Image (cartoon, grey):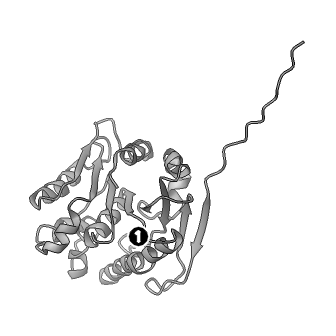
């Protein structure tokens, strides 16, 4: 009788996950940030409207890109959102919403970006990313600070801040609304910093998607001779998690870092 060699196959190791927080001078509170993975370039992810740092994990978007995380291609930094303290807050006066929005951007630039460098033990390429309202944040922070980032993946976004402000519009709003400030941008250094970066603007054309918003942003970028990838998916592609779970791994597979 022949013997059989029993080989024990270890279970797949769970994705490395750490939660960090500190007192933010910009926000005057202790927001959290989730870090997934060991090493690689940084994917800075902004949640959808009113959501938190673990939303992308809960809806299995991170599972859809787990191969990129597990093999060390990238490391995910998923930040908390404060949209409920700004544009989605129905009680605050609009000028306070605008101020809170600016404080959030200050938090990302002055606190999160240094944290990413420290966590990665040195500067690494950083790609901003988000879906829905998170796409707006990812695009806006990239276009306002193109010298700090290597690209953006914006899925199913609207890039006109007036969509969220109920008619209110001040200087803070103007300088945080890409379709408003980009057409008038003439600073050659800032424009040069945007060029040759990986800019991906994507949308479905199905229920609750707004492909016209992506086309509008694309037209503005074309007018500035800024190379980018506008990718409009079909009418069966809706504004929902299955869409973003298809899109994100596809774009990560094809992005140039």
User: Is there any visible trace of residue 5 in the rendered image?
Assistant: yes
Q: Nearer the viewer, residue 195 or 29?
A: 195
Quarter in which the C terminus is drawn: bottom left
At a point 47% along the width and 87% down the height, the residue shown is 25
State whether residue 10 is above or below residue 216.
above
Q: Which residue appears farthest toward the top when viewing the image? A: 1
Please provide percent x and percent y for residue 122: 47, 72
> Residue 109: x, y in percent?
38, 77
Q: Residue 47, how many percent across, how many down?
A: 44, 61
Disc 1 designates what residue? Answer: 83
The residue under the point 29% across, 56% down is 198
Front-most of residues 199 and 31: 199
Q: Is residue 46 visible?
A: no
Location of residue 250 with respect to 103 vertically, above or below: above
Q: Residue at x 13, y 75 (%)?
A: 187
Choose between 151 and 21: the one closer to the eye: 151
What is the quadrant of residue 232 in the picture?
top left
């Amino acid at each position: 009788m022949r013997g059989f060699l029993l080989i024990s196959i270890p279970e797949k190791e769970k994705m490395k996950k750490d939660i960090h927080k500190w007192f933010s001078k910009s926000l005057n509170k202790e927001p959290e940030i989730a870090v997934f993975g060991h090493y690689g370039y940084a994917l800075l992810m902004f949640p959808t409207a009113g959501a938190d740092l673990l939303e992308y994990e809960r809806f299995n978007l991170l599972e859809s890109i787990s191969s990129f995380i597990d093999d060390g291609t990238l490391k995910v930094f998923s930040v908390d959102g404060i949209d409920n303290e700004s544009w989605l807050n129905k009680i605050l006066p609009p000028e306070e919403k605008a101020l809170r929005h600016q404080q959030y951007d200050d938090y990302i630039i002055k606190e999160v970006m240094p944290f990413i460098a420290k966590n990665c033990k040195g500067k690494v390429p950083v790609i901003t990313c988000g879906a829905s309202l998170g796409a707006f944040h990812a695009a806006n922070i990239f276009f306002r600070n193109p010298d700090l980032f290597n690209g953006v993946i914006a899925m199913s976004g609207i890039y006109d801040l007036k969509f969220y402000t109920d008619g209110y519009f001040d200087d803070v709003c103007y300088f945080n609304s890409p379709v408003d400030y980009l057409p008038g941008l003439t600073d050659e250094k800032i424009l040069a910093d945007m060029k040759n970066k990986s800019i991906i603007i994507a949308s479905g054309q199905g229920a609750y998607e707004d492909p016209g918003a992506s086309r509008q942003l694309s037209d503005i970028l074309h007018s500035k001779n800024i190379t980018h990838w506008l990718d409009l998916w079909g009418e069966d592609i809706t504004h929902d998690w299955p869409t973003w779970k298809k899109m994100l791994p596809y774009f990560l597979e094809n992005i140039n870092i």
